[in-house]
Image: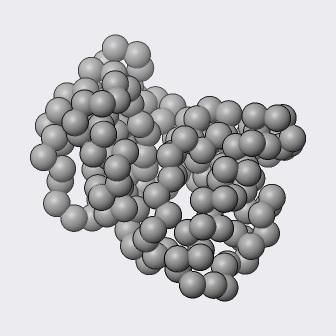
Amino acid sequence: MVCDPNFRVTSLCARWPGSCHDSRIWRTSSLCQQFENGIHDGLLLGDSGYPLTRYLMTPYLTPRTPAEERFNASLCRTRVLIEQTFGIMKRKFQALHFGLRTSPEQAIVYITASCILHNIAIDRQDTRISDDCITINIRDCQAQVVQGPAAPTRNDGILKRATITNGFF
């Protein structure tokens, strides 16, 4: 899933089992292909389980400068919105919290419907965002090891991340 700053789901890929690694799901998603083909101009934020690319920023695994540490802290404070969105949705739709006991095909339908209903509730201001979603704990953003081969655009990502770090942090 991808969300915006208002906890609204903007992209969803629900066809994979929970045991599948997030980076694999990302690589096969239509949103990834759209970014690869230049359809979108912008940046996404991910944890270190995702590959660093020109459009997907991930934290420095071992920050060497104060600027890199500030970059990581800022990325974490922003990226945690998706985790908070998951929490909001699991509280709203208890079946998502406890697990769906249905066929994988039907689970896709339920998850997609939950996202649509969640967005409608956000748009109508029917969803209450509690104060615990505003308080962000940077320690919750633990570094993970990237699995699998690096993306072909990794050098572009390294350069872009360095440019952002040096220009803003």
From the viewer's perspective, tell me whether residue 40 is left or right of residue 2: left
Q: Residue 120: percent from the left, percent from the top?
A: 75, 42
Toward which corner of the image does residue 42 lie, by quadrant? Answer: top left
Residue 108 in view (yes/no): yes
Image quadrant containing the C terminus: top left
Q: Residue at x 38, y 31 (%)?
A: 43
Give 42 or 67, whichever is nearer the viewer: 42
Give 102 or 60, whichever is nearer the viewer: 102
Residue 64 in view (yes/no): no
- Find the residue positioned furthest to the top: 167
From the viewer's perspective, tell me whether residue 99 is left or right of residue 12: right
From the viewer's perspective, tell me whether residue 51 is left or right of residue 80: left
Above or below 37: residue 104: below
Toward which corner of the image does residue 165 lie, by quadrant? Answer: top left
- Colour setting: one colour
Q: Residue 146: percent from the left, percent from the top?
A: 29, 59
From the viewer's perspective, tell me whether residue 3 is left or right of residue 6: left
Q: Residue 127: percent from the left, percent from the top?
A: 83, 43
Q: Residue at x 35, y 37 (%)?
A: 57
Q: Residue at x 51, y 31 (%)?
A: 74
Above or below 92: residue 36: above
Q: Residue at x 73, y 49 (%)?
A: 118
Toward which corner of the image does residue 90 lie, by quadrant? Answer: bottom right
